[in-house]
Image: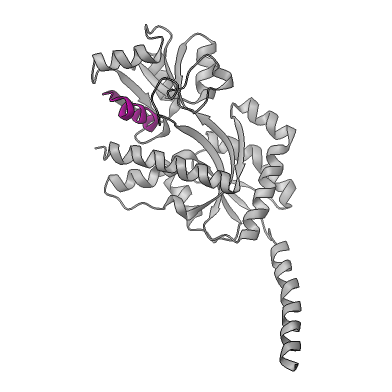
Amino acid sequence: MKRRVLLVAASALSAPAAATAQQSYPSRPISLVVAFPPGGQADVVARLAAPALERDLGVPVPVSNRPGASGEVGNSFVARAAPDGHTLLMGLSFMTLVPEAARVNGREPAYSPDQLQPIALFSLDPTVLIVPASSPIRTVEEFVEDVRRRPGAVAYSSAGNYSALHVSVVMLSQAAGLDMLHVPFQGGGPATAALLGGQVQCMAATPSAAAPLVRDGRARALAVWGRSRLPSFEGVPTFIERGFEGVEFYIWVGLFAPRGTPTSVVDRLRMAARSVTEAAEFQRAMAASGNTLDFRDGETFQRFYDEDTARGVRVVQRLGPIQ
């Protein structure tokens, strides 16, 4: 009887302690890491979300840019951080390709995608295939026919080897059996300048980058790498519509924590992220920045993350090393 009383007392004491531990998060400022320099897509979303997260969580949420090695520096920093919810990553979709690119080139990856726990997806945009307005190519069918007629002669620019703008075109090439010439640049800006300057014949671009070019009559959109058409490009078909099943590539931005972060902390962060995206001010800011708001969390985000990672990894594995 005495032993039972002690057990009940211990249980009664531990319950408030557990509740207190959950309520103590966050106990200090939260570092929101971006693995790229200021001004990029992940950085823009992070700086829009940070003030709203601060209001919801009650602590400062400074954005910390840790660029280097195509995002490897910042991503691995968060992957190795203490899993207590005080170091988070505003990750860019490219983060799932970096480890596989290292592996196929004979280098040990600095981190693995499964070391990062998906919290919430903020934005999701499929890439868009564009050609200069002066190009005679007006449809996907004409584009594919032209590339097949001139193997190795049709050039496309990208933001660098294994970048999203590179891998999306490689995905199309693998699915359609195309032989194209890749011309990598250091960033999307120079890649776009090469297209407009006539150095290359096409490129994959984000919708926010492609829209003003198409609107101003400087470029023409041929197809979208999404599963469904974009509202801002209603007349532009998807590759899937045109019979290229599996040609689906997205540039997305999402919130991550180190794997092993307590469930209670993950749940609290999901609630805060949802609160951020429901705010009209955040929605307006995202639209103004050219990022398509697409909130997903829990199993929905995890499932998308796993499927998207698998698609990209397969393309990189088939692509192999780049000298």
Residue 53 percent location from the top left of the image: 69, 46
Pick the front one: 144 or 181: 144
Its colouring scheme is: one colour
Whether 169 is among the magenta residues is yes
Q: Residue at x 54, y 16 (%)?
A: 212
Q: In which quarter of the image is the C terminus?
A: top left
Residue 206 percent location from the top left of the image: 49, 26
Q: In which quarter of the image is the N terminus?
A: bottom right
Residue 82 percent location from the top left of the image: 54, 61
Q: Is residue 12 above or below residue 256?
A: below
Whether 302 is among the magenta residues is no
Q: Main secondary structure of the magenta part?
A: helix
Q: Is residue 234 above or below residue 97?
A: above
Q: Which residue is drawn at 37% across and 33% down?
A: 167
- Stretch of the chain drawn in magenta: 166-181
Q: Can residue 33 be seen in this view?
A: no
Would you say 54 lies left or right of 313 here?
Answer: right
